[in-house]
Amino acid sequence: MNLPNFLSFVRIFSVPVFILLVLNHQMRWGLFLFIMAGVTDALDGYIAKKFLQVTELGKYLDPLADKVLLTSGFVTLTITGHIPLWITLLVVTRDLVIIAGAIVFQVITGSLKMEPLAVSKVNTLMQIILISVVMFKEIRPLDYPMEDIMYIIVTFTTLLSGIIYIFVWTKRAVEQEPS
C-alpha cells in the first residue's frame, strides 16, 4: 500500500472518532481531527500525482474517503443542531445523484473512469471550510457573517457541481452509445 492510499484509509478510519468527539461536545478535538483529515485529502492527491503513485484503488478510495468524512460531518452536525437540515439534504442528495449517475453510466457504457471535475474539488474544499467554520464558531463565536457566506457558497458549488456532473456524464454516455 502506498502513502496516498494509506492517508485515504486514515481519513476513513478517523470518521468514527470525529463523530464521537462531536457527539460528546469535544468541538476543539473534533475540529482538530476534521482539519487534519482535510489536510490528508489535499496531501494524498499531491503525493500521488507528484511522485507518480496514482493507483486504481486510490481513484476510488480518495473520493470515498471524502464522501464518508463530509457526509458524516454534515449529518453529525445536523443531528447536534449545528447545521440546518436543508444544507445536509442538499449535500447528501447531490452525492447520491452522482453515485447513481456513476452506476447508470457504468451499466450503459461499461467504461466508468473516476475523474473528479475541478468544480467538484472546489465544492469539497468549500464543504470542508463550512464544517470547519461551524465547528470553530462553537469554540469561539464569530463577529462576522462567515458562516452565512459559507452556506451561500456551498449551496452554489453543490448545485453547480451536481448539474455539471449530470451534463458531462450524460454527454459522455450519449457519445459512447452504439449507433
Image (cartoon, rainbow, N blue to C red):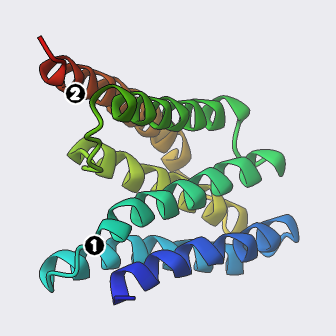
Judge left or right: residue 74 versus residue 51: right
Question: Residue at 76% of width from left, 66% of height from top?
Answer: 19
Kind of residue at badge 1: Thr
Check disc 2 and report the residue beneath it: 168
Choose between 146 and 122: the one closer to the eye: 122
Choose between 70 and 9: the one closer to the eye: 9
Check disc 1 and report the residue beneath it: 55
Q: Is residue 101 above or below residue 142?
A: above
Q: CB of mark 1 within 8 Å of CB of mark 2?
A: no
Question: Residue at 35% of width from left, 81% of height from top?
Answer: 4
Looking at the rendered image, the disc whose residue lies closer to the viewer, 1 or 2, is 1
Kind of residue at badge 2: Val
Where's residue 172, x and y in %? 18, 26
Q: Is residue 62 above or below residue 118?
A: below
Q: CA distance from mark 1 to mark 2?
A: 23 Å
Question: Residue at 67% of width from left, 56% of height from top?
Answer: 72
Judge left or right: residue 63 versus residue 92: left
Q: Quadrant of the C terminus?
A: top left
Single out the residue that lies furthest toward the front. 178
Q: Is residue 99 above or below residue 25?
A: above
Q: Quadrant of the N terminus?
A: bottom left
Q: Earlier in the sequence, mark 1 or mark 2?
A: 1
Total of numbered circles in the picture? 2
Choose between 177 and 52: the one closer to the eye: 177
